[in-house]
């Protein structure tokens, strides 16, 4: 695994995965794991922009009505306003690579490190982190800038895995194998230090 400490932060890009209205109109939104999700993602977007680093957004589409092509809910959440140079990519896979042009775009920009945020923690976020690590990227998995929901056991009615357990399992599976687990506050602080270092060099 290529670790974050082996790749400079100025070679990083932020991935905002499936932060879309499709989720907010379903009953499970009331049971989401992370009520600070929007604030944390917004803080990271601001920090990456301030550092002059790339930001990518993704929208997931599938056969569910809220996620279908043509649905009015297939759009980014209102707190996100991509700039003209911040791509919004449509995907129909659990990871952000195999159904988009992400890999080519990252190569063109010289990106070797990715910060993962979005929905759902254990699905599209975790799957993207795993594939990114296998493709040779260093990965910062910003755990408190992801969100998820209880997982219902399809084979046992009434049984489900709670959100705390879902998040815990993702952290255990990724840490030291596919990603560095990091908080929004720590990554924002690191980006601030990067900006300060750049200003001092320029001076």
Image (tube, rainbow, N blue to C red):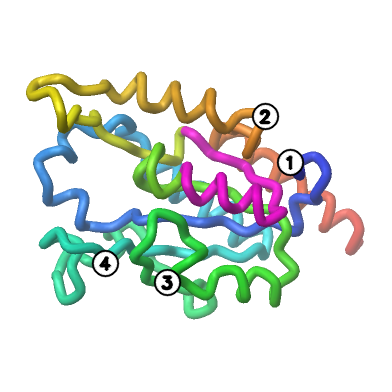
Residue marked by disc 2: 176
Give the extent of the magenta segment: 126-143
Observer-side mark, 1 or 4, equals 1
The reply to whether callout 2 and callout 4 are in contact (CB within 8 Å) is: no
Q: Residues within 10 Å of mark 3 (few under 14, many from 20)?
A: some
| Contact check, label 1 and label 2, Cβ < 8 Å | yes
Residue toward you, 173 or 11: 173
Residue 143 drawn at (x, y percent)? 49, 34
Residue beneath label 3, please?
88
Residue at point 14% right, 70% down?
Answer: 71
Residue 75 image label: 4
Foreground tag (2 vs 4): 2
Residue 21 horizontal side relative to residue 49, left or right: left
Q: Nearer the viewer, mark 3 or mark 1?
A: 1
Residue 10 in which image quadrant: bottom right
Q: Residue at x 75, y 69 (%)?
A: 110
Q: Tell me: 140 left or right of 197.
A: left
Sequence-earlier tag: 1 or 4: 1
| Magenta stretch encompasses residue 133 | yes
- Give the mark nearest the N terminus, 2 or 4: 4
Numbered circle sitting on residue 1: 1
Mark 2 or mark 1, which is nearer the start of the sequence?
1
Disc 3 versus disc 1: distance between alpha carbons?
28 Å
Which of disc 1 and disc 3 is earlier in sequence?
A: 1
Verify CB contact (< 8 Å) between mark 2 and mark 3. no
């Amino acid at each position: 695994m290529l670790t974050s400490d082996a790749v400079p932060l100025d070679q990083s890009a932020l991935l905002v995965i499936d932060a879309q209205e499709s989720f907010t109109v379903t009953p499970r939104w009331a049971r989401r794991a992370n009520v600070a999700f929007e604030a944390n993602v917004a803080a990271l977007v601001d920090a990456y922009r301030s550092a002059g680093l790339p930001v990518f957004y993704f929208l997931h589409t599938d056969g569910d009505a809220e996620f279908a092509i043509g649905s009015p809910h297939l759009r980014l959440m209102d707190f996100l306003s991509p700039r003209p140079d911040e791509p919004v990519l449509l995907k129909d896979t659990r990871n952000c690579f195999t159904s988009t042009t992400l890999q080519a775009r990252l190569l063109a920009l010289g990106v070797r490190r990715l910060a993962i945020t979005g929905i759902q923690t254990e699905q599209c976020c975790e799957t993207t982190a795993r594939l990114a690590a296998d493709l040779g990227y260093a990965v910062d998995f910003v755990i408190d800038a992801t969100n998820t929901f209880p997982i219902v056991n399809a084979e046992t009615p009434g049984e489900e895995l709670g959100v705390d357990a879902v998040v815990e399992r993702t952290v255990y599976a990724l840490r030291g194998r596919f990603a560095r687990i990091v908080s929004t506050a720590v990554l924002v602080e690191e980006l601030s230090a990067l900006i300060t270092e750049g200003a001092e060099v320029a001076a």
